Image (cartoon, grey):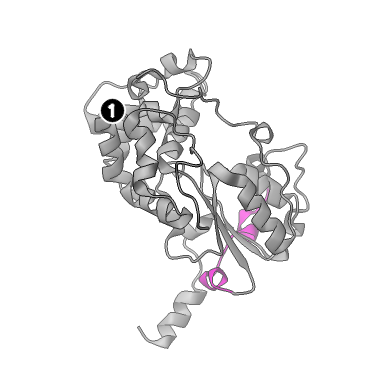
Amino acid sequence: MDITQDIIDAIRPIHRRSPYKFHYFLRDLGLVYLAIPKNANSFLRHALFAHSKMTADFRPAEESVAAYMNRTPSRRLKVRRRRALSNPHYCRLVVLRNPLERLVSAYLEKFVRPGPDGMADKYRGIVARAARALDRNITPETFTFEDFLRHAATCDDMELNPHWRPQQHYVADTTFDFHGDVADLEATRAFLLGRLGIDIGATGGDRRTNALRYAGGASDGMDAGRLTPTDLRAMEAYPAAASFYAPPLLECFLQRYEPDLHLYATRLGYTREALLAPFRAGGPAMNPRGTIRNTGR
């Protein structure tokens, strides 16, 4: 490719189906933020929008980020040219998440928590497609995590909903100045404060009102992957993420999401073996610090 084509690629507008459309370009803050769905992106956008002059009309005490995005032209906040992703004058931030936990969270949020009458039509459509793909009679009330994952394994990236599309798809070939971790949002807060002078505030769970509640510790050998949404809603708290992965389902996950596990491990300084150990043992998967190495950012 000659230099002319390089220039054309740099200034070419971002396609609407491109992974780059999830990059927010907050020029006044000097920040490009890749908001990967299910990676605390609602919380982080809420905090960043409250600081940016580009979103001065955002009312953080009165509306959610989703409500704000529904009433404001999103193009003015998004990266529109690829050259912005390599501009040295802007800081590039992404927050990653353990893909094993991210997948469970997506299933619980979209297919379990809404209840039989609250599920959005697009997710009912996904259940119907899963029933056809798996050649089984599946309804929204019988759609288990096992069904969810086995259907995902039959789809390519662009066929998957953004909430469980692999993080690797979004990261693509972008180079980031900081890789945050959903399991350690305080590190992201410290980075933004030190690098850009932005204090996104406390990042505890009490500030994330839409957070799912999980039971602590192991779930006594429970195979949560085969529980129906009705079964799961009847529980006081959802089983630990590791309880959803029986050995055959963990192998199914690895066949579909191995690149995502590699991305999370290498960018954040974990080892693959340490990330998988709690899931192979069926124990808690809530990022056991001290047993999983986390040295790099």
Residue 60 in the magenta stretch? The answer is no
- Residue closest to the far front: 290
Tell me where residue 171 appears, x and y as whole percent.
Answer: 45, 58
Q: Is residue 165 left or right of residue 130?
A: right
Q: Is residue 45 above or below residue 230?
A: below
Residue at left offset 60%, top offset 74%? 88
Residue span colored magenta: 72-87
Residue at left offset 50%, top offset 57%? 296
The quarter in which the N terminus is drawn is bottom left
Q: Secondary structure at mark 1?
A: helix
Residue 75 in the magenta stretch? The answer is yes
Tell me where residue 291 appears, x and y as whole percent.
Answer: 45, 41
Could you tell me if residue 192 is visible in this image? yes
The residue pinned by badge 1 equals 131
Q: Is residue 128 left or right of residue 288?
A: left
Tell me where residue 104 appears, x and y as whole percent.
Answer: 43, 33
Q: In the depicted view, which residue is nearer to us: 126 or 40?
A: 40
Residue at left offset 31%, top offset 22%? 138
Q: In the depicted view, which residue is nearer to us: 96 or 116?
A: 96
Tell me where residue 267 appears, x and y as whole percent.
Answer: 45, 57
| Quarter holding residue 231 | top left
The amino acid type found where label 1 is placed reads: Ala
- Residue closest to the far bottom: 3
Q: Is residue 297 above or below residue 282?
A: below
